[in-house]
Image (cartoon, helix red, strand yellow):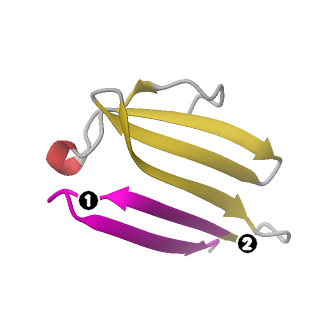
Amino acid sequence: MHIYDGKPHPTTGVAGGIYDASAYTRIDANTINFVRSKDGKAVQTGWGAVSGDGKTYTVTTGGTGPNGQAMSTVGVYDKQ
């Protein structure tokens, strides 16, 4: 469950324990920003956005991956 107050909240079940808290901020009706942290230090940042027609959700993430290496991902999800 996401809480859109910009404050870190515990996050469990993350593979590899990459992060242990997430902070979500709603930018507008279709866009959120997030910061994922481990032991109080930001390790990943990103945003998610729903397209204007509501049929596509895109999530972009950057930061540190499971091996401490730099990573970036883009996920695009289409409504069925």
**Under tag 1, what secondary structure?**
loop
Query: Is residue 65 located in the magenta-colored stretch of the structure?
Result: yes
Position of 55 relative to 44 (above/below): below
Which residue sits at x=85%, y=69%? 52
Name the residue tied to disc 1: 65
- Front-most of residues 13 and 66: 66
Which residue sits at x=48%, y=26%? 8
- Disc 2 from disc 1: Cα separation: 29 Å
Q: In which quarter of the image is residue 20?
A: top left
Q: Where is residue 32 in the image (x, y as percent from the top left)?
A: 67, 48
Start and end of the magenta stretch? Answer: 57-79
Q: Where is residue 53 in the image (x, y as percent from the top left)?
A: 84, 71
Horizontal side of residue 43 vs 15, given as left or right: right
Image quarter where the C terminus lies is bottom right
Q: In which quarter of the image is residue 64?
A: bottom left
Position of 9 relative to 26 (above/below): above
Mark 2 or 1, closer to the camera:
1
Q: Are marks 2 and 1 in contact (CB under 8 Å)?
A: no
Which residue sits at x=53%, y=65%? 60
Which residue sits at x=56%, y=24%? 7
Name the residue tied to disc 2: 55
**Main secondary structure type of the part rendered in magenta:** strand
Q: Where is residue 12 in the image (x, y as percent from the top left)?
A: 29, 33
Indicate the amino acid at tag 1: Gly
Query: Is residue 75 located in the magenta-colored stretch of the structure?
Result: yes
